[in-house]
Image (cartoon, helix red, strand yellow):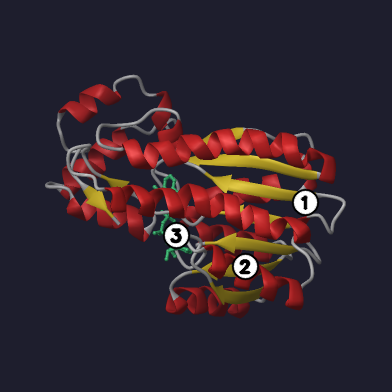
Amino acid sequence: MKLCNQVALITGAGNGIGRGIAQILAKEGATVIIATIVKEEGEQTVSDICKEGGNAYFIQTDVSSEKSIIDMTKKVNEQFGTIHTLVNNAGITVFKSIEEATIEDWNKVINTNLRGMYFVTKHALPLLKQNKKSSIINISSNHSKCTIADSEMYTATKTGINGMTRAMAISLGKYGIRVNAICPGFTNTSHHQQWIREQGAPEEIEKKVLDLHAADRICTPADIGKLALYLASDDSEMMTGSELLIDGGATSYLFHTTFESDEILTKTTDF
Ligand SMILES: NC(=O)c1ccc[n+]([C@@H]2O[C@H](COP(=O)([O-])OP(=O)(O)OC[C@H]3O[C@@H](n4cnc5c(N)ncnc54)[C@H](O)[C@@H]3O)[C@@H](O)[C@H]2O)c1
C-alpha cells in the first residue's frame, strides 16, 4: 500500500469526485478525513469506507467560512497531529450570463472554489509541515483550459486555482510540500447527472458529450482518484506546480464551438 500510516484531508468528499478520491486513498492505507458541508453525505462516505476496511472520519466543514476551516483544522490537529495529503476538492458550479449574475453569485462561487482553497491550505499548513514530504492536490477543471459562454465566474475560479497552484508550489517547496492541480473534464457525478437532466434533451446532450471523448466514455470519480493517488504518492516525487488534464480527450477536440452553437450547453446551471 502506497499511503500506509498517512493522513489525507479531502474537502467536499461527501459526494462525487471527492468521495472517489477518498475511497482510493483509503484503499492505499491512508486515514481519510472527510471535510464536507452536508452531514448525511459525510457520514455515508465514512460508513462506506469503513465497511471496506478503511479508516475514515467526518468533520463537518464549510470551506467558504474561515471560522469553519479553523475549527476543522483544530480538530484534525487534536486527533491526528499531521496531514500528509490535502485534497482541495470542494467546489460549486454556477453558470449564468453576465446580465443575469449577481454579486451574491460571484461571492458564493469565489468564496467556495477559490478563497476556500486558499484558506484551507493556510490553516492546514502547520500540519503539512510536520512531515518531510507532503502533497497538496487542487481540483481545478478543464474549464481552466477552454470554456463555454456564461461560465465567467466558474472559469475565473478554476483558472485562478491553476495560478495559485503554481505560486504555492514555489512558496512551499522549501518545506518539502508539492502542489499540483488536477483538471477533470466531464465526470460522472450526481452533480453532472443533474446538469444533464436540466438540459432540454438529456439523451441528445448525453450523446453529444460522449461524441467529444476519444476514450468513448466520460471520467468516473475513480479515474480522478487514481490520478490523485499518483500525486499523493512518492511516484510523483518530481511533480510540483503541474496542471494535469484528465478528460478522455474532450479538451483536444477542435470543434467545441459547433457543439456550443446548438445552444444546448449555454443553459443556466446553478448547483
Ligand atoms: N463533475 C464534473 O464533471 C467536474 C468536472 C471538472 C471539475 N469538477 C470539480 O470537481 C470538484 C467536485 O465536483 P463534483 O462533481 O464531485 O461535485 P459534487 O456536487 O458531486 O460534490 C461536491 C461536494 O462538495 C460539497 N460542498 C459544496 N460546497 C461546500 C462547502 N462550502 N464546503 C464543503 N463542502 C462543500 C458538496 O456537499 C458535495 O459533497 C469541484 O471542485 C468541481 O468544480 C467537477
In the rendered image, which residue does mark 3 sit on?
16
Circle 1: residue type: Ser
In the rendered image, which residue does mark 2 sit on?
70
Q: Is residue 211 left or right of residue 65?
A: left
Q: Residues within 10 Å of mark 2 (few under 14, many from 20)?
A: some
Residue 216 seen by the camera: no
How many labels were placed on the picture?
3
Q: How much space separates mark 2 and mark 1, taking CA atoms?
A: 20 Å
List the single residue furthest toward the right: 132
Q: Secondary structure at mark 3?
A: helix
Residue at 20% in and 55% down: 197
Q: Residues within 10 Å of mark 3 (few under 14, many from 20)?
A: some
Q: Quadrant of the N terminus?
A: bottom right
Can you tell which quarter of the image residue 50 is in? Answer: bottom right
Q: Nearer the viewer, residue 41 or 172?
A: 172
Measured as percent of width and height from the top left, residue 229 is found at 66, 51
Can you tell which quarter of the image residue 211 is in? Answer: top left
Q: Quadrant of ligand 1?
A: bottom left
Asked if 258 appears above or below 175 in the picture, the reply is above
Q: Nearer the viewer, mark 3 or mark 2?
A: 2
Q: Nearer the viewer, residue 216 or 177?
A: 177
